[in-house]
Image (cartoon, helix red, strand yellow):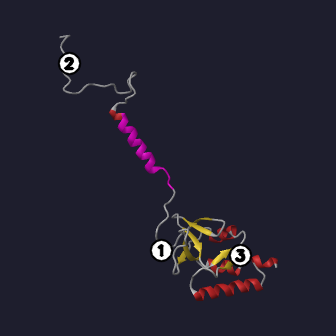
Amino acid sequence: MRDEKRKTFGFIPRPLFFHPSSFIPHPFFAGLGGLLLTVVLFFWPHPPIPPETLGPGPYRVAAVENDGILQLDNGAKVRLLGILPAGPTRDAVAARVANQPVRLRFDRNRKDPAGRFLAYVYLPDVCLNEDLLQAGAARAAMDFPFDARRKQHFLRLEQEAHRARRGLWSRE
């Protein structure tokens, strides 16, 4: 019986763990490693993918960049339409939008050449674009195409801040 071969029925038993002379793992553990890698990559925190379209909101502002661009909680970047923030307005804007929902209103052009959304940003009590102009923290952007009536309104707000010597006009 010693010389008799064991009947294996087509299955050759392999060791459960790595065999010392081989680097080939048992198929069960190879599959388990792939499954573990898939689960880790699936649940790994990814930055939000900015949306291609954006509705009126409400949204939360996650960050404010130096040039007055708002990054929303969904990853979209929004440029304040019709104004050019001047000087260190980042902290003022961040304090103004902190823990408040914002709503967006769009004009003819929804995006700028850099792919950021162009919008009038509304807080519960005021339009942020107008508020920055009134405080003298921004200038009206006359070279950018947007609604003519709103452009005139923004120019009046900038002139009012200039006459009252507020914000960036206080140095003159």
Q: Taking the image as drawn, is residue 77 in sight?
A: yes
Name the amino acid, label 3: Ala
Earlier-in-chain disc, 1 versus 3: 1
Earlier-in-chain disc, 2 versus 1: 2
> Where is residue 158 drawn, in percent x and y?
70, 83
Residue that label 1 marks? 55
Quadrant of residue 113 within the rendered picture? bottom right
Name the amino acid, label 1: Gly
Residue that label 3 marks? 137
Secondary-structure class at tag 3: loop
Q: Are marks 1 and 3 in contact (CB under 8 Å)?
A: no
> Where is residue 136 drawn, in percent x and y?
72, 78
Residue located 20% across and 18% down the image: 6
What stretch of residues is rendered in magenta?
A: 29-46
Q: Taking the image as drawn, is residue 123 in sight?
A: no
> Where is residue 109 drawn, in percent x and y?
52, 78
Q: Which mark is residue 6?
A: 2
Q: Toward the viewer: 23 or 112?
A: 112
* The N terminus: image quadrant: top left
